[in-house]
Amino acid sequence: MLVLALLVTVVWLAGRHEVEQTQSVLDRDTADAVSDLRDGMQRNVQTLRASLAGGVDREQWENRAAALLRDHREWLRLEWRDAALKPIGMVDSPYRRRIFEPDDRGPGQPDVEQACASARKLGTPAYSPSHYVPVIQGTGLEVMEVCVPVEGGGYLVAAYSLRDILGELLAPMLSRGQEVAFTEADGTRLVAIGAPRRIGTRVFSAQQLIDLPGATLMLRVDGWRAVPDLFPNMLTALVTAISIALVSVLVLLARDTRRRQRAEGDLADALAFRKAMEDSVITGLRARDLQGRITYVNPAFCEMVGFSAEELMGSSDVDVPYWPTELAHEYQRRQAARLAGGTPPREGFESVFMRKDGSRFPVLIFEAPLINALGSQTGWMSASIDISEQRRVEELSRASQERLQASARLATVGEMASLLSHELTQPLAAIASYASGSLNLLHAEGATRAREHEEVAMAVRRIAEQADRAGQVIRSVHDFVRRRDRTREAVAPQALVEAVLPLVRLQARKLGVRIELALEDALPAVVCDRTLVEQVLLNLARNGMQAMDTPGPGERVLRLRVARAASAGGAAGGGPDARRWLEFSVADLGCGISEEVAARLFTPFFTTRADGMGLGLSLCRTVVEQHGGVLMYEPHRPRGTVFRFTLPTA
């Protein structure tokens, strides 16, 4: 109770001191404001007298008065009157609408007469009492005149706005956060500026008398301060805070004790959970300090090596019982690299552990540094995985892979035999055709022997060429199966077409097909395996003619075309790269390709002909793609199909 009573007394005394201090500051500011007002109004009187210096006429004075009104917003009007108070010149403020009518400012104005009479009697400038001047819509201004006698007779009269006096002649800081007002001697408020009073604030007031010749005004300053002021200064706040802290410390201690108990319980649960988790994993965990001594092992690690945790704890790198003797140097070298700051690989490393019975088994070890809460390394943590079963599975997989490769080689031999039989059919058929033609020419009647010999020689040369072509096909297919690099050369596209044209025309005459050629001018050479590309052209032409070998009156036309590709590699879109490719197309007027056949068109051994093997299009696409191009097909209008493939230019 004594401490509480002392605290209340200190706060009350401090609050009282604060109130007195605030009041004294307000009184001092008010006295300074009164001094500023008097000085400002005295300067204004001197300015008015200076406006008539030098014997000016009315027009000159009005120009000077207008300039003065622009610099002094507190003036509403300046008047120059003669000794009988008749106006000589009048100028109104440019900042307000005119509030005085010319007829109202004659010699009979009582406020001006009273001020000028006081000035004439005292010989100094005199002020009139404040009076209210209505303006418009029920509003008005509190106005006060000052009358300044001038040499040679006459007066200068200036009409003041009391509100503008407060705004212009007082420092702006005085009206911030408080209210400044002119009042009469009985306390009647005339005008006021500044911040209005806020709800819940305490009022501090100070007033000073402004004794002007002929008039008396009071300057009142009201300051606001929030209430209640529980802590008026830092000292009382400090005393109160210490007192409250003494009472609160026991509450905080009690709460801290309960919080610690909950934290200890949570920590125990977390440790139990971590222990259960480490005991349940099948990965061996091991922790070591920076000197290489084992500080922790989990049950999985003990089960893996066959040693108990007591036998392993505290063991150093040089005497761990699960490390084979023949690999001790490797272990020491790795530990030295770690102590030197080396970082173990994230993918881990393989090693060999030794069980208690002496048996060896391979392990995969992952190591990472142990970092404490302060960010310092305290040791190393490693996870070990027994990969014995993985090695056994890998051996079985390796054996199965070898058997699979052997089977694949046997399948490749069969595929090569099928390819050879398919690809040699055409050149051998050509050889047979040329041989039959040679025999027919030898037995022809009615031809000269010289011409017969020339044609027989041509046929025999064709037979030799096709025999050589059959050999090239055998070698190319053999290299294709064995994945050898073929010899590629720059070949003119015209030469590729002309090489297969005799065979194409031979079959075309048999089936009644008309051949059309369309080759663009100045085509560049293409880089390709000539034999394989000729085989692609021959296969596509042969397929197109066979597609038109159906009963019906329709026209049979096979169109071979070579042009610059519209896009690189046959892909969509153009660009500068399109100039480096040529496009070969074979178009027929056959029955077209159905959706069911299109889904399996390039599948090996799929064919729609009874005598076909289903390897032609598969081989064609493989050859084109190995050259970097693409093989495409699309419907041909009005009927049939067009096959296109691209090859790179030289």
Image (spheres, helix red, strand yellow):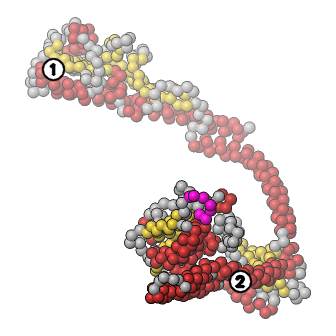
The magenta region covers 547-554
Going by the numbered disc 1, the residue's amino acid type is Val
Most distant residue in the right direction: 357
Q: Main secondary structure of the magenta part?
A: loop
Residue 628, by quadrant, is bottom right
| Label 2, label 1: how far apart the Cα atoms are | 136 Å
Where residue 494 appears, as percent x and y from the top left, is: 45, 75
Q: Is residue 77 visible?
A: yes
Pick the front one: 556 or 110 = 556
Quick one: quadrant of the C terminus?
bottom left
Which residue is found at the position 33% from the left and 25% from the top?
165
In the rendered image, the vertical position of residue 251 relative to residue 284, given as above or below: above
- Residue 240 position in % (x across, y down): 65, 42
Location of residue 146 by image quarter: top left
* Residue ID at (78%, 83%): 403
User: Which residue, given by chain and number where applicable, does mark 1 sit on?
Assistant: 150
Q: Residue at x 28, y 15 (%)?
A: 99
Secondary structure of residue under mark 1: loop
Instruction: Tell me which label, 2 or 1, sits earlier in the chain.
Output: 1
- Which secondary structure, mark 2? helix
x and y, in percent, of residue 447 in the image: 47, 83
Out of 611 and 507, give the one closest to the viewer: 507
* Residue named by callout 2: 413
- In the rendered structure, which amino acid carries the disc numbered 2? Val
Q: Are marks 2 and 1 in contact (CB under 8 Å)?
A: no
Let me know if residue 548 is in the magenta part: yes
Q: Is residue 222 left or right of residue 531?
A: left
Please tell me which residue is depicted at 57% across the width and 77% down the height of the picture.
Answer: 535
